[in-house]
Amino acid sequence: MNTAVLVQAPGAAAAVPASLSDEALARESVRAQAALRRRKWVIIGLRLLFLFVVLGGWELAASRKWIDPFFYSQPSLIWEQIVEWVRDGTSQGPLWVQIAVTLEETVIGFLIGGIGGIIFGIVLGRNKLLADVFSLYIKIANSIPRVVLGSVFVIALGLGMASKVALAVVMVFFVVFGNAFQGVIEADKYLIANARILGASPRQVTTAVVIPSAMSWILASLHVSFGFALVGAVVGEFLGAKQGMGLLIATAQGAFNASGVFAAMILLAAVALVADFVLTRLEKRLLKWRPAAF
């Protein structure tokens, strides 16, 4: 009887027959890659199907008057509104200017809040005394409603870009700070101890051991915080601005133009999706060592 010998490394998920030839392994690899490609196309197809069902049902319900299109609009009217903005511009000026203003405020707020959150998270994570002193004040500041802060920033900084950037910074800072702080705390204590035994200084331990260990936490927070920065910029514009997508939404709301509100929301979602794609590519580039998720 020809019995295949199973060779399994410690901690391996599955055993591989030792008698399996290179050709068989190659065939299995090709088959697995094909299955992954099929799964990818199935996911895309299901997403498109879901979108078609939602938009089709919405259009049908509005056209049959099952829902009032005055309040809920309908996809065809929203598309016409976007086309009109692209062709003729908005009441505040060209559409691309409104998107550019909001995107500029978002990016500046994202960078300032992200860098500040990383620095403060690492410093407080590495210094228990500072963490104990400032933890109470950070909790108090984080508990203040963002809309209230937005109103304060508009009053203090005016209707210009500064008030929107400030709100975007606040929205991003606490998300990034919390993840950076937790990532530093969760750093492997044995690696830190070994580095100290080998003569590493506190600064070297932080830069060579702690920060790389916390990088996954930090990048995960940056991945989601861009959306918070966009929300902060739009809310700030909604409260008071001269240009931007938030002002466009506020103007549409004041005119009871539901199609304008939904159209602006769709444009903002498109901007957020593009930013998410860029950040995902950057995360994969910086974390090449991390195993791919299936």
Image (cartoon, rainbow, N blue to C red):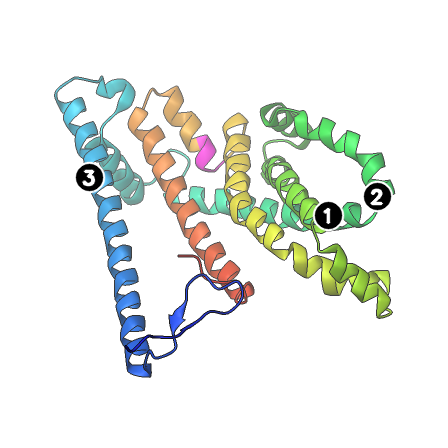
Magenta span: 243-247
- Overall secondary structure of the magenta stretch? helix
Q: Amino acid at mark 1?
A: Ile
The disc, 1 or 2, on the residue closer to the chain's N-terminal end is 2
Q: Nearer the viewer, residue 80 or 207?
A: 207
> Separation of disc 1 and disc 3 at Cα?
46 Å
- Crowd tier of the residue under label 1, counting other residues whose Cα lies within 10 Å: few below 14, some 14–19, many 20 or above: some
Placement of the N terminus among the 4 image quadrants: bottom left
The disc, 1 or 3, on the residue closer to the chain's N-terminal end is 3
Quadrant location of residue 23? bottom left
Q: Nearer the viewer, residue 102 or 75?
A: 75
Q: Nearer the viewer, residue 38 or 233?
A: 38
**Residue at numbered disc 1:** 185
The disc, 2 or 3, on the residue closer to the chain's N-terminal end is 3
Mark drawn on residue 126? none
Where's residue 34, x and y in %? 26, 66
Residue at 58% over, 53% down: 219
Q: Is residue 152 left or right of residue 192?
A: left
**Residue at numbered disc 3:** 52
Q: Amino acid at mark 3?
A: Phe
Q: Nearer the viewer, residue 158 or 165?
A: 165
Where's residue 74, x and y in %? 22, 28
Q: Is residue 62 above or below residue 54?
A: above
> Separation of disc 1 and disc 2 at Cα?
10 Å
Dot 3 falls on a residue whose secondary structure is helix
Mark drawn on residue 128? 2
